[in-house]
Image (cartoon, rainbow, N blue to C red):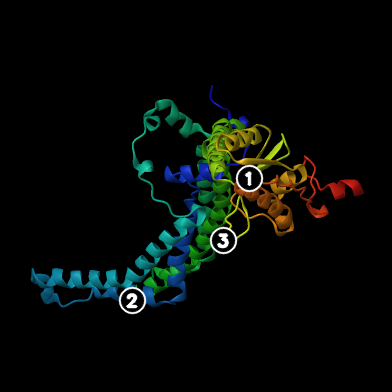
Amino acid sequence: MADSSEDRTEEPTSRRLSDARKEGQIARSTELPAAAVTIAAVGLIFFSGSYFFNKLAENFAAGFNFDRKLVFSSNLLPALFASELLQSYLLIIPIFILTVVVAIASTGLTGGYNFSLQAAMPKASKLNPMSGIKRIFGPKAWVELGKAILKFVLVTFVVVLVLNNNIDTLHMIGRMPIEPALQTAGAMLTKSALLITLALVIIAMIDVPYQRWQFMKQMRMTKQEVKDEMRQSEGNPEIKGQIRRKQREMSNARMIDSVKNADVVITNPEHFAVALSYDPNGDSAPILLAKGTDEVAARIREEAQKHGIEIFQAAPLARALYFTTEIEHPVPEDLYYAVAQVIAYVFNLASITPGAPPVQKPDPKVPEAMQFDSMGRLQTQEAVV
């Protein structure tokens, strides 16, 4: 069942607007370009003074003043008319160029510029008679009818106003010579066109915000559509969770595999385990190769036993290393002494000879600032609390 317009309560997302733009759906006002083109053309004529109408009057009058010999020439008379038409055409070229530029510029003011091949593709919905009837009698059709009636009323009012104010001038035009008559009529038409453009501006000021509001209303989404889009753009949470689990498993597998390169594993003894590596010929601090708690710690211990790596039980030191050191990073300076005791003990065990006295196991001390409980809280802070 299709969602009704009442269900579309959510503002459109950027992806929804982008997809609509690809399909050629953008906010568009036809009244704004019409008003802009009319204003540009009439404004150019008005601010150029009487230049256009004087030149047109001259060309028009010149068409009726020619040598009578031209009438009997099949070549010269058409050439004369062609010359007059060309001059008139050249006269209106600036107006034509200005209107084209303004039309292109004003078209993109409402919803921007957009070229979409999808909008030109044939759609079955456009051939559906029921869809056509809905468009004819739908709200948009009534709005267009209202705009047409408003334009008719405003333009009619302006025309009537101009005629009432210039009735005497209209009577005089009929008794004037052709050039002054054309100039007077042109001036009167220019003023009338300016008033008409004001009416078009009023309509455009109403139509532009309406078209934007109507477009955003049309683009609104249901809550389910927003959820579906988020799921598509961000991915299914369950799948993302599975990916993260798989990544953790792969990371843990690599970490466990690195335990074979460790020199010692320090444990809690059961809940924490960290594996350390130290190069006695180098000048760097011991490196933490692996760490973990509970099941991961058990796997680290098992891997250490498999490769004959010494497991040293020192709960405070194991916790301190676990909470302060990242994998493949050197141990903190505050733990150098405690770790050095453990590593020296392990190296001494490896170098002991049969019959030699046993190596005394150290009891490494951890500074108070590095003493953590099993939750990762500093014990000194917990004591203060």
In this view, the residue in front, 226 or 212, is: 226
The span from disc 3 to disc 2 (Cα, nearest Å) is 96 Å
Residue bearing mark 1: 264
Q: Secondary structure at mark 3?
A: loop
**Residues packed near mark 3 inside 10 Å, few (<14), some (14 to 19) or many (20 plus):** few
Dividing the picture into quarters, in which one does residue 59 lie? bottom left
**Residues packed near mark 1 inside 10 Å, few (<14), some (14 to 19) or many (20 plus):** many
Q: Residue shown at 32%/69% (left/top)? A: 93
Disc with the residue nearer the chain's start (1 vs 2):
2
The span from disc 1 to disc 2 (Cα, nearest Å) is 103 Å
Residue 382: x, y in percent? Answer: 87, 46
Q: Residue shown at 44%/71% (left/top)? A: 44
Residue 265: x, y in percent? Answer: 64, 42
The span from disc 1 to disc 3 (Cα, nearest Å) is 17 Å
Using the image, tell me which numbered label, if any, was put on residue 75: none
For badge 1, the amino acid type reads Val
Most distant residue in the front direction = 355
Residue bearing mark 2: 55
Residue 250: x, y in percent? Answer: 52, 37
Residue bearing mark 3: 282
Q: Quick check: 112 above or below 2? A: below
